Image: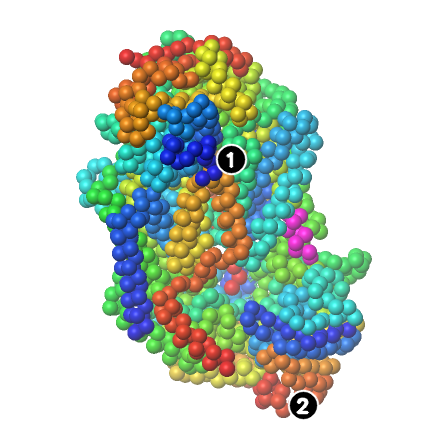
Amino acid sequence: MSLLEVKELTKNFGGLAAVSNVDFVIEENELIGLIGPNGAGKTTFFNLLTGVYVPTEGTIELEKDGEKILLNGKAPYKITDLGLARTFQNIRLFKELTVMDNVLIAMHSKKGSNTFHSLFRTPTYYRAEEEMRTKALELLAIFELENKYDVLAKNLPYGEQRRLEIVRALATKPKILFLDEPAAGMNPQETAELTALIRKIQKDFKITVVLIEHDMSLVMNVCERIYVLEYGRLLAHGTPEEIQKNPAVIKAYLGGD
Amino acid sequence: MKQFNKNNLGWLILIALMAGILYMGIMTNIISPFYQITLVTILINIILAVGLNLVIGFSGQFSLGHAGFMAIGAYSGAVIGAQVEGFLGFLLGLFVGMVISVIVALVVGIPTLRLKGDYLAIATLGIAEIIRILILNMGDLTNGARGISGISFPFASNLSFIMVLFALVIITTIITVNYIKSSPGRATIAIREDEIAAESMGVNTTTYKVIAFMIGAATASIAGSLYGTYFSVINPGDFTFQKSIDVLIIVVFGGIGSVTGTVVAAVVLGILNTFLQSFGELRMIFYAVAIIAIMVFRPGGLLGTKEFTISGLLNRKAKKASAKKEVQ
Amino acid sequence: MLKVKNLSVHYGMIQAIKDISFEVNEGEIVTLIGANGAGKSTILRTISGLVRPSAGEIEYLGQPIHHMPTRKIVEQGIAQVPEGRHVFKELTVQENLDLGSFTRKDKQNIAADLEHVFERFPILSERKNQDAATLSGGEQQMLAMGRALMTKPKLLLLDEPSMGLAPIFIKEIFRIIQDIQKQGTTILLIEQNAKVALQIANRGYVLETGNIVLTGTGEELLASDEVQKAYLGG
Amino acid sequence: MDNLVQQLINGISLGSIYALIALGYTMVYGVIKLINFAHGEIYMVGAYVGYGLIQRVGLGLFPAILISMLFCAILGVVIEKVAYKPLRGATRVATLITAIGVSYLLQNVMIYIMGPEVKAFPTALKVQNWTFGGVTINSQQIVIFLTTVVLMVGLQLIVKYTKMGKAMRAVSTDPEAAQLMGINVDNVISFTFVLGSSLAGAAGVLVGIYYNSISPLMGVTPGLKAFVAAVFGGIGIIPGALVGGYAIGIIETLVSAYGGSMFKDAVVYLILIIILIVKPSGIFGKNIKEKV
Amino acid sequence: SSDTTATGAASGDTIKLGGNFELSGGASAYGTLMDQGIKLAVEQVNAAGGVAGKQVDYTSYDNKSEPAESASVATRLATQDKVVAILGPATTGAANAQSPAVTRAKVPAILPAATGDGVTMSGNSVLEYVFRVCFQDSFQGTALAEFAQKDLGAKKAVILVDNSTDYAIGLADAFKETFNGEIVAEENFTAGDTDFKAILTNISKMDYDVIFLPGYYEEGGLIIKQAREMGIKQPILGPDGFANSVLVDLAGAENVNNVYYASHFTPNSEDPKVKEFLAAFQAKYGKPADSFAALAYDAANLVFKSIETAGSADPQAITDALAKTKDFEGVTGTFSFDKNHNPVKSAFVIELQNGVEVGNTVVEPAK
Ligand SMILES: Nc1ncnc2c1ncn2[C@@H]1O[C@H](COP(=O)(O)OP(=O)(O)OP(=O)(O)O)[C@@H](O)[C@H]1O
Ligand SMILES: Nc1ncnc2c1ncn2[C@@H]1O[C@H](COP(=O)(O)OP(=O)(O)OP(=O)(O)O)[C@@H](O)[C@H]1O
Ligand SMILES: CC(C)C[C@H](N)C(=O)O
Ligand SMILES: [Mg+2]
Ligand SMILES: [Mg+2]
């Protein structure tokens, strides 16, 4: 089977179906785009996959070591442990902590020493700590943030905050990385740089990236497949070329020129 | 890594120095019996407040139930101290109190720590009150409202008690600091910063909240045992909501999230309190005005979230130089 | 209409705005462009009185306003769509829009204006009784815009109004901006989407770490190499 | 049966008093998200002002209540300006500690001026008892009950339907955006304190009359209970404060009535905790999960 | 310190006396009155030429109504200020916390009103430096139980107890032990409560002859009022905690019928000493003295007398003299100390009708 299979996923808020009957497949090493008008249900869809919301109906299944694991209703931290990581549409860094700490926190479930070792500062603790820091610096270097390791997250300019969010998500060692509007608030120049970075990490880390974005220069450039949502439903699905030509998508989302 | 050791060494020297000063001071009676009481109160308050700071300042969970755990420790110490002779009884009481507190913290923490902000505050306050009311109604075991007096004091002198107390202050503080500066500690701080993001980074928020709560409970219990042992009388009226507030004031005063700030605040408030003894009816008026004034002028507390560090002290010059470079 | 003279703004020790001057004339669309952290939002916040300048003056309709409290500035007819939307999360969409007209005296026109906002943003009408907190990012952006329109401002300050909007709606939003300009509202616009912003703007200023480094008409700036390279991605 | 009805009446009249104080708590909380620990002390000051006016000056009940409300309103605004306003940007615990400081201050200044001991409140209202079957109810209970309900409805109307009410809710969610709407945030907050504190003042006088007893520490227990009541109902929600107040009054009374007087507070807290576990934002609290 | 009432004599010529009182916090209503009672005694003795020719210098500190503070204040007085004797604290809890400190410093402490059983004891042995001038709770509880069955002829009693104070609980226990009849019900309240209707409604349906109400006048007054308004007519019996005129104010004079309480002294006494004390107190403070002020006044005078008998202001000498106290004539009665440093003195049970004292019964201590 595929890496992740979503079947007939539905989320209702009161009378409103924010996500409705969506089928979605993620394979290994892909770059997938998720687009759609405002309020189409894209963020809600991410929230369902990462455990922030519990689906009203439908299934989310992850394949791991040849087994299928049902993700419905699992706590977010468990889903992260299983290899799904994300960034947030409204940046949610640990603002009062340093860049380094932000990354170390994300590593903790994989590498951190346990409570006992930390309380009594055993050699294991020092070894684990040292390893984590080295690893974190490596990750930060990819995003050119290594020199800012001791800056408080809130003091970073906006663009760097977005990048740090990606580093932090990567630090959880995900198989699938979900990015929610990573280019929002960036100018075209910065967006272009980000585009290259996303390609690079997808290749280097051998992961799948799923991204929500309204900036078509980014989406059409990097994504291999695109899903389009409208009113919670799947409106279309295909390659960038197909989507750009799809009249329904043009009408609902892209707008004609 | 080198820096790390230098820093630790610095602290070690400072602690040894302080222990030496205390020892000599008490031996020579320069720290008179009266100042010893103030000292004991301050040291006990440090244990209480450091633990509460872990819960409130670092894990971001607003607990108003500290007095309940202190009561558990005090009563365990008193009851067991009466059964088991000597120092062993003291240790056993200390230990049993910790175990009970940790179990209570675990059992009530799991369901209630899901609550947010003021709802959690009220729930924890409720737990402390329930503990207190149970103690009040435990018949001959706790002696109800009459409390327990003549609690055993298995120390050769005040000096030896104070040295043991000092050691416990150091141990609990080091454990707390070690915890904060470790991977689980960082996970705990992440919860304070943004619970949803923390969970999405793989942090099991319930676990870490409960661990912080349990460490806080254990240290409060230790403080309670020491309190009962030293002052020899306890009754349920000593562990009301008011006591939790007193500790909270120390934490906020020092700066939420600053361990060294907590220590400084405990010392400052301890001295202020003793100083105000002679003001009779005006005492609490001055105290209240002091609280308001300090909060108005230093809303972040004495140290904010900063820590006083030895390495900071050592590096002060180096940093100044490099800061200049950056500007140019 | 708006004259900013030798303005400096500090956040603690950091100087975010360094002695800049510019002006906006009645009926114009003026845009401020610049990289992240250049100080664009700070300027808007200072005009609205949310941040106090450390030096310099701001004059609006010939009257200094840099000492006025925000609400007075709003009463004079300066509205803002702030960065990060700042909708009233615990209130419904309808209540948010009502608050837009809080200081208005012409009660009789309010209902019509509300209709107008709903026409422009049909989704808000569908979500009328929903709490703003649960709106999607883009919906919140529309609400912030709608709310500002309800104040019927003489001068509208827009801080990245297209952020998080779907492409089809970005076009719509710029159309709306031009519309309200036609109806007589003056506009000071910040946009990451510098290209479109410069296309509709009468004039623009380029900001770099708190300084104005370039100024000109929309076309001039669009044609400038520097702007092309730094802000338009090629 | 009579007994149960009588106890319910007892519970409701006790609950009315908690509710009356809780309303002010919740008002202030709703707007500036501050647990105004000094609220119980404003209630106490209200009672003393009423005492002074009736006992020493010889005024009648209604002028005394009005003047006391006025006095407390001014006091509330002064406290806000001096002690809370400078902390607006600070953490909420910092403001909480300041509020505790203010509450100590008011208690001890009152002790300094009036002495620490309990004082008997003059009987300013003739008590009329009515008995139906085995059940007795008196005029004061009815007055307090009606006052509480009327005030609750009044407050709710103000907050929901007036322009000021809208402004209050706007300030509550986003003070900065509220300014951008032309709202005078300082005025709104002052108004909130005027409302909340004058309510406390009225409550002080009414309770003084009802129990016939006032003391400088009289605000502590009801203050705490009122806070619990506000949490019970969902902090910031006006009908919630009322329901929370009644819930606590009735639980306390019934627990005492059926042999648990030793445990009445413990039972109240236990029920509170259980309710919060089921409904983490109180009975009326909206449990919106934060939109991510 | 601001609370000094020295009259200007050089320090060598003064006797330093310390006060450890609840001047702030929950028990400040008692502590403050006691402090005032002592200041009056000091003023009078200084005006009359002092004690053994020396002026008395009285310093009091606030213990915040907290045990730890009480230990701190006692230590401060004994070791820093080097007082020759300590007066206070008011309550049993604070007194217990003070005992180790005075024992260590070997300075006598005289407790005006700490009535808890065993306050002067450590296990089975007496604390050498701790004395009190009030009777203890078990004596009072016993006396009231006997009064209930003998004088009131009660067979069935209801107990309403303040479960938050050791004082009230001790009283209730002693009462239960002595009372031969049936205890129909025991209900609890907490100091600071104002609404007692729930428990009163409960007992209003029961059959009994007397209500025993161990607690203080603050709650006692309100309970009397609410009970009488509810139509409960049985006699109400209270401890010395009722001995304050505010009790009647709180309850309303018309409700205070069939109310009896134990007291250390009666303001209606014909004894000139008592009259003089009451007048002097009223003149100095503008309010009536209650029994707590009277007890503190006695405690101070007892110290003065012991210094005179000892002929020295040395703490140990004072302690020895105190222990030998015989027939000390105070405003709260004439008493001697037993071997446990408790005064052997009689109690009054005062009867109130329509809010006024109509009579009293003297209860002699058991021999
Ligand atoms: N908790 C909620 N309660 C009610 N409605 C909700 C809730 N969360 C989301 N919605 C509604 O569900 C719809 C989908 O929202 P979602 O945030 O997923 O949109 P989106 O596709 O991410 O949009 P955008 O591109 O603007 O971010 C929106 O109309 C929103 O108003
Ligand atoms: N509240 C604050 N405290 C301290 N520094 C601040 C604060 N707000 C902004 N700054 C700093 O001031 C500078 C200007 O920020 P501003 O938000 O005005 O930039 P901007 O041009 O709007 O950037 P963006 O495109 O990211 O919105 C930045 O360096 C920023 O870090
Ligand atoms: C002053 C009194 C109220 C003290 C009380 N008799 C007690 O022991 O504790
Ligand atoms: Mg979205
Ligand atoms: Mg900006």
Q: Does the magenta stretch include residue D187?
A: yes
Residue B240 location (% of width, % of height): 41, 40
Q: Which amino acid does label 1 sit on?
A: Leu
To the question of a shared chain for discs 1 and 2, the answer is no
Q: Which amino acid does label 2 sit on?
A: Ala
Left or right of E101 on screen, residue E199: right
Depth order, front residue of C212/A138: C212
Residue A240 location (% of width, % of height): 54, 82
Q: Which residue occupies 47% across, 22% down?
A: E290
Compared with B15, E214 (above or below) is above
| 1 vs 2, front mark | 1
The answer to whether any part of residue E113 appears in the image is: no
Q: For mark 1, what is the residue? A: D217
Q: For mark 2, what is the residue? A: C223
Q: Magenta residues?
A: D183-192
The answer to which image quadrant residue C233 occupies is bottom right
Depth order, front residue of B267/D256: B267
